Image (cartoon, helix red, strand yellow):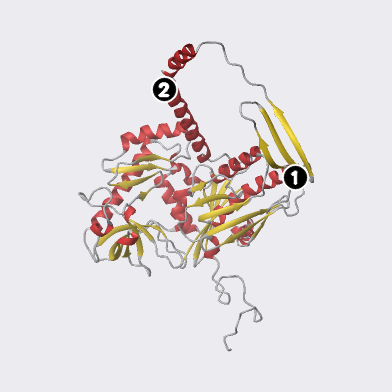
């Protein structure tokens, strides 16, 4: 939302005579025209001949290249350290503790994450929203499109999946970047993995580069990559790098996850052993048999969430189903025994989600408008191409000045936007219209707040600085359906537009005429 301010003086002309330090400007202030003259002192040159100055420049120039390189390297190191600082999530406020709640119903399972009493994440699995992401299939090539640098594959779903040229696993001898029509032809069998579920009219996105996620790391067959989560502190990254160098199996790449913080060498080696064994089974099953068919399926939602999110930050895990609690306990005893005693069965008469007010917070997360504690509010609109978030002061009027009022409102909005993105699981392109601020310092602090808030989100997010129109743009990885898509359907009357045309609209002719 824009706030109108008194315009700054308009510069009509500026004249600076050549060879002088006198600057004359003519400005228009209101209805008056004012002429301003500024005189600055000319810096004095040190005495010395032209030859002496030339010799001095040559002497200094010998090390200037090295000094410039050192300065560039120092700036690059500072930028890299700053980027890592934004990736490391800030600690929770003192007294705020995280816990995970699980509700098991006959037709669906819901998992939520609470920070104190506040709901920050929600996961759901049912017959309609079950995800295929991470599953491995033996697929058949149905159509190769050289002009799109993609191929469509039948992997057993209702819609064919798309495999782009950049995601194929090229056979040996095919070169670094082979043409997709040189690698595939119709009817070929291909081992693929789903990286993004089908959404709307688009089919699932596939990749030929298979990766096997575990508790502490991700194993990448036929690769030599070695990476460590940037969300970990530098000292822990160095320790894990030394451990992985000796534990990484030949012919496999390894990407260490955030959950590996504090894990011992034995824990990491055991995780690698389980994943290597799993990959050998997949490779053996893919060598023969009919296609399309499923080769490997990811565990059910509850185990996936535990694997991806349940870390030492969580105080406990409450589950209202004994069988589900037993499954989770067995998984943690095998992969992370130190966390197994944090699993508790909820047996009170009051339903689990009612006790922690989860239902109320979920209902608010499905609404278009989000109210802030100060009196301001957000308006979140989803479109075909992107999501737009508008920040408004609403009833918040502040106390000291307009700039401070806007600044405080924007900071509160930035914190809430980070929570809403996680809770609603909004992906794709996101544009935020914060309220305009004149202070560059306040703008920098706002962007720092945005990045710190998003650092708590495990889904990959890229944030760009404020653009020329005062908008903040970001992208968030889109893997599965959002909260709104899971609990809503398109209106049959307006086809999702949100409006119905009037009969008396100019140019509108009823169908019966």
Within 10 Å of disc 2 (Cα), the crowding (few <14, some 14-19, many 20+) is few
Q: Are marks 1 and 2 in contact (CB under 8 Å)?
A: no
> Circle 1 sits in a helix, a strand or a loop, which is it?
helix
Numbered tag placed on residue 227 in the rendering: none
Which residue is situated farthest in the bottom direction here?
513
State left or right for residue 398 relative to residue 421: right
State the quadrant of the N terminus. Answer: bottom right
Q: Which residue is mark 2?
A: 66
Q: Earlier in the sequence, mark 1 or mark 2?
A: 2
Residue 18 shows in the view: yes
**At which x and y percent is residue 295?**
30, 60
Q: Which residue is mark 1?
A: 402
Q: Residue 199's quadrant in the figure?
A: bottom left
Cα distance between the residues tagged 1 and 2: 48 Å
**At which x and y percent is residue 78?**
50, 31
In the image, residue 508 sits, relative to residue 156, either above or below, namely: below
In the image, residue 171 sits, relative to residue 338, either above or below, namely: below
Which residue is situated farthest in the left direction here?
173
Give the residue displayed 31% in from the left and 34% down from the top.
246
Q: Residue 368's quadrant in the figure?
A: bottom right
State left or right for residue 18 relative to residue 196: right
């Amino acid at each position: 939302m824009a706030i109108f301010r008194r315009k700054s003086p308009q510069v009509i002309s500026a004249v600076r005579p050549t060879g002088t330090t006198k600057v004359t400007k003519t400005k228009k202030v209101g209805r008056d025209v004012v002429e301003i003259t500024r005189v600055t002192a000319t810096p004095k040159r040190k005495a010395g001949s032209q030859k002496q100055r030339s010799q001095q420049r040559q002497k200094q120039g010998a090390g200037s290249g090295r000094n410039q390189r050192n300065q560039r390297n120092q700036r690059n190191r500072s930028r890299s350290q700053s980027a890592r600082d934004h990736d490391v999530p800030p600690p929770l406020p003192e007294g705020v503790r995280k816990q995970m709640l699980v509700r098991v119903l006959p037709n669906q399972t819901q998992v939520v994450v609470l920070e104190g009493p506040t709901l920050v994440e929600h996961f759901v699995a049912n017959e309609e929203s079950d995800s295929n992401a991470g599953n491995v299939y033996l697929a058949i090539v149905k159509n190769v499109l050289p002009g799109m640098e993609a191929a469509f594959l039948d992997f057993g779903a209702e819609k064919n999946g798309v495999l782009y040229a950049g995601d194929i696993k090229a056979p040996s001898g095919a070169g670094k970047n082979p043409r997709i029509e040189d690698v595939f032809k119709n009817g070929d069998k291909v081992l693929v993995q789903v990286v993004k579920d089908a959404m709307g009219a688009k089919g699932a996105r596939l990749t030929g580069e298979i990766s096997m996620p575990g508790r502490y790391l991700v194993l990448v067959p036929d690769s030599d990559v070695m990476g460590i989560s940037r969300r970990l502190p530098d000292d822990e990254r160095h320790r894990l790098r030394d451990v992985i160098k000796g534990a990484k199996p030949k012919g496999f790449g390894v990407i260490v996850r955030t959950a590996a913080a504090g894990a011992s060498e034995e824990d990491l080696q055991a995780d690698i052993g389980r994943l290597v064994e799993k990959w050998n089974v997949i490779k053996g099953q893919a060598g023969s048999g009919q296609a399309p068919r499923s080769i490997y399926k990811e565990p059910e939602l509850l185990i996936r969430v535990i694997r991806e999110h349940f870390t030492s930050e969580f105080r406990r895990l409450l589950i209202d189903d004994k069988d589900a609690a037993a499954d989770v306990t067995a998984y943690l005893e095998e992969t992370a025994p130190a966390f197994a005693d944090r699993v508790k069965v909820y047996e009170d008469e009051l339903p689990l989600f009612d006790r922690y007010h989860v239902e109320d917070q979920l209902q608010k997360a499905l609404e278009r408008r989000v109210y802030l504690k100060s009196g301001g509010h957000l308006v979140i609109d989803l479109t075909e191409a992107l999501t737009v978030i508008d920040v408004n002061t609403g009833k918040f009027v502040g106390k000291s000045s307009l700039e401070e009022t806007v600044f405080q409102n924007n900071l509160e909005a930035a914190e809430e936007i980070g929570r809403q993105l996680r809770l609603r699981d909004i992906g794709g392109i996101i544009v935020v219209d914060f309220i305009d601020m004149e202070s560059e310092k306040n703008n920098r602090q706002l962007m720092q707040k945005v990045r710190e808030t998003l650092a708590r989100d495990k889904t990959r997010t890229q944030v760009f600085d404020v653009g020329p129109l005062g908008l903040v743009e970001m992208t968030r990885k889109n893997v599965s359906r959002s909260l709104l898509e899971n609990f809503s359907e398109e209106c049959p009357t307006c086809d999702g537009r949100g409006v119905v045309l009037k009969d008396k609209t100019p140019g509108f002719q009823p169908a019966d005429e």
